[in-house]
Amino acid sequence: MQIEFNTSRITKADVGQPAARPEAAPASTDTTSFTSAASLDAQLRTVPEVRTHKVALAKSLITNPNYPPQELLDRIAALLAVHNLK
């Protein structure tokens, strides 16, 4: 390889070896059926949008005056102070 430091001089580029062509990808032999995906889709459609047990838990936590615990609030405050978050 030759380095030309005179940038105003145009030189012929060294052609060298041609790049090897990548081999064509083999035809897909994937025979996976989509029955499992269809089954998952059907199961997803049966999941309710509202989980009543989680709503009940949230309602019970809201009425609890000791939630969240003071220790948890103190730890979050310490983390915010350490990381200088606003």
Image (cartoon, rainbow, N blue to C red):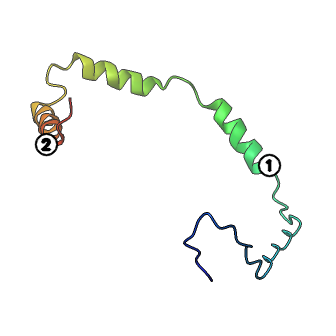
> Which sits earlier in the primary sequence, circle 1 or circle 2?
1
Quarter holding the N terminus is bottom right
Estimate the x, y position of residue 44 in percent, counting from the top left: 65, 35
Taking 12 as reference, is 67 above or below it? above
Residue 49 position in % (x across, y down): 56, 24
Identify the mark at residue 2; answer none if there is no mark.
none
According to the picture, the residue beneath numbered tag 1 turns out to be 35
Q: Nearer the viewer, residue 62 or 14?
A: 14
Q: Look at label 2 and name its amino acid.
A: Val
Residue ID for mark 2 = 82
Task: Judge left or right: residue 28 versus residue 83.
Answer: right
**Which secondary structure, mark 1?**
helix
Residue at x 10%, y 30% (from the top left corner): 70
> What kind of residue is marked 1?
Thr
Badge 2 density bin: few <14, some 14–19, many ≥20, Cα 10 Å: few
Q: Quadrant of residue 81?
A: top left
Give the mark toward the camera: 1 or 2: 2
Q: Which is nearer the eye, 51 or 29?
A: 29
- Give how far across and how far down residue 16 sits, in percent: 76, 81
User: Given the current orientation, which residue lies at the most extreme right position?
Assistant: 27
The percent coordinates of residue 80 (x first, y second) are 17, 36
Q: Estimate how packed mark 1 is, as few (under 14), some (14 to 19) or many (20 or more) residues with alpha carbons within 10 Å.
A: few
Give me the residue at 59% from left, 74% from top: 4
Tell me the residue at 33%/23% (across/down).
58
SS label for mark 2: helix
